[in-house]
Amino acid sequence: MNTRGLSLDTIPPLLIPLRFFLTAPLFGICAALLIFYQGSDIWLSRWSFSSLALTHLVTLGFMLMVMIGGLYQFIPVMVGQLIPAGQYLAPVIHSLLVIGTFSLAAAFLSHFIFLYVLALISLALSLSLFAFSLIPLLIAQLNKHLLVYLLRILLVVLAITIAFGLYMLFSYSFPDSLINYRLYTDIHALWGLLGWTVLLIMAVSSQVIPMFYVTPEFSKNSLKLLSMAIVLTLIMLSFSLLLIKDKLFSGIFFELLLSIELLVFSLYSLWLIEHRKRKLADVTISFFRIAHFSLLVVIILWWFYAQVISAEEELLKTQMEFILAISLVYGLALSAIIGLLQKIVPFLIFLHLQRLSLKHPGTISLVPNMKKIISTKNSKIQFLFHCLSLFLLIFSVFFPQWVWLAAILMMINFIWLWKNLLQGIFLYQKNRKQILNYNYSYET
Amino acid sequence: MMQTTATFNRGVILLTTTINTFMSAHHKECDDLFAAAENSIASGDWDNGVSQWLEFTNELENHFSREETIIFPEFESKTGSVGGPTQMMRMEHEQMRSLVSELSKAAADKDMEQFLGLSETLMVTMQQHNMKEEQMLYPMIDHAMPDVTDIIARMV
């Protein structure tokens, strides 16, 4: 093992991950505003531009935003090296991602070519900068940890998703080029909504569930095999979509295979959660339960969608497509992410204040424990808002006259998240000042 | 419980020849003791909780002292590396000791809210510390010292 350059004292400046975490809820609020503004039209068709704008506000603006911030924090703990030049690159990557996501959503809603071009350039730049700063660490690491393995696969899947996305964006920007948008959108959505979302939750679950809840470990080989099988199935499914026009046996076979793989993962995770030794009521574990339960719902509905509903039942098919997307993004990914933020942000604030207090003896009482940064009560309220908004979003697909209520609850969910994170930051700043100004004469 | 712990450790010696497997297993053992104490206290069973908490803190201190008095000095003298990663780990031990002493005070005062807030914080701190050791430091130590049978024997 090459240990040169390894350091165990690797925590990036607090602002690097926090700027991503604090921006994400704002995109959630924008997404809720868009639903509110569009009203019942938002669930008319998944091909509508407003639903494309909505999907990207949440997936790029929230999910990818938190993931990049999280990786800036987590990779150093895993591999002993900071992501290079974070102090200079993170603000650039962050700003470009903000500009790219906004201009993409605005382009879908307005069709200004200029906005498509702006989105193309800023997203391509932002994601390549991040990928290039990450690749050396992931290639060079000889460390055989499961998470490093899953991260590599995750980033490949994300790269494929983004490549299809950028390709379509390129065609929107230069409308002379003719491509089969629907086909490419299906493949882009398959890799993004199923591949990226599920593998992201797999990588996070494999690490977090055993560690924080004292459960049996996930079997390394099973998860390696499972993640590889999911990617191979996605590849085969994409080929069958690209090469075979009618849905033939091969497509159905690979869909069945993929759903079995997902079923194994969700049941395995739920089984581990039930066998945890750390039994105390914990909001993050409730969020994880909702996440994995949503995945189960997705699998069942997918089969219903693919096999039971006939092509003529267009309304029901459209409703199912939206429910699948809501369950995957809001139910699976966002539940796990919002649940984790309840722990990650308080821990980071604690960690930085504790480090500071070690240099200023006598100030340990100024370091708040995690639950003083985001209280259990506030996290429970978050969980309530999240579950209510998830339920109402699904409900509003069938009863679109209630979509305004779903949008309001979704907005409250993200505002509450943002408020809790901000309160944490204010507490950090206040206590940091007190620690720095601590006067020894106040002792005794 | 202490008896089981010692037996378990002896069982592991026969199976392992690396610091990483031996000490990682001990991390898990500490996690189990921690979870048991926290479960009891969260359910209001202070009598059992406080004695289980004591059991955990003894085992944790035992773990730290194995590292600070046996493993780290051996590694430092073998590699000449002082003030590097082992120093960082010693500092994190101090951070955890400070949390543990606050927790013991909360347990003595039967202050559940304070205890659970601190126990959550200790849990996350412990886990990220363990991850650094299991992913980086222990493999470095095993690499620098191929034969650790003597060292493991001194730890039980």
Image (cartoon, coloured by chain):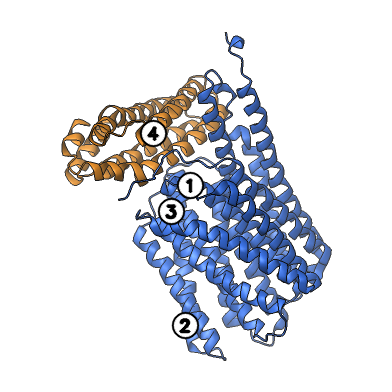
Chain colours: A blue, B orange
* Camera-side mark, 4 or 1: 1
Residue that appears at 41% across and 60% down:
A139
The circle drawn on residue A82 is 1
Number of residues whose C-alpha sits closer than 10 Å to that of mark 1, classed few (under 14), some (14–19) or many (20 or more)? many
Q: Label 4 sits on what residue type?
A: Met
The reply, left or right, for residue B76 in relation to residue B37 is left
Residue corresponding to mark 2: A253
Residue contact at pointers 3 and 1, CB within 8 angstroms? no
Residue A335, placed above or below residue B101: below
Residue A75, placed above or below residue B28: below
Secondary element at image label 2 = helix
The reply, left or right, for residue B78 in relation to residue A23 is left
Chain identifier of the residue bearing label 4 in the image = B
Q: Label 2 sits on what residue type?
A: Phe
Residue that appears at 71% across and 76% down:
A173
Number of residues whose C-alpha sits closer than 10 Å to that of mark 3, classed few (under 14), some (14–19) or many (20 or more)? some
| Label 4 – label 2 distance at C-alpha | 51 Å
Number of residues whose C-alpha sits closer than 10 Å to that of mark 2, classed few (under 14), some (14–19) or many (20 or more)? few
Secondary element at image label 3 = helix
Residue that appears at 68% across and 54% down:
A95
Residue that appears at 36% across and 58% down:
A220
Residue corresponding to mark 4: B89
Q: Label 3 sits on what residue type?
A: Leu
Q: Label 1 sits on what residue type?
A: Leu
* Camera-side mark, 3 or 4: 4
Residue A153, picture quadrant: bottom left
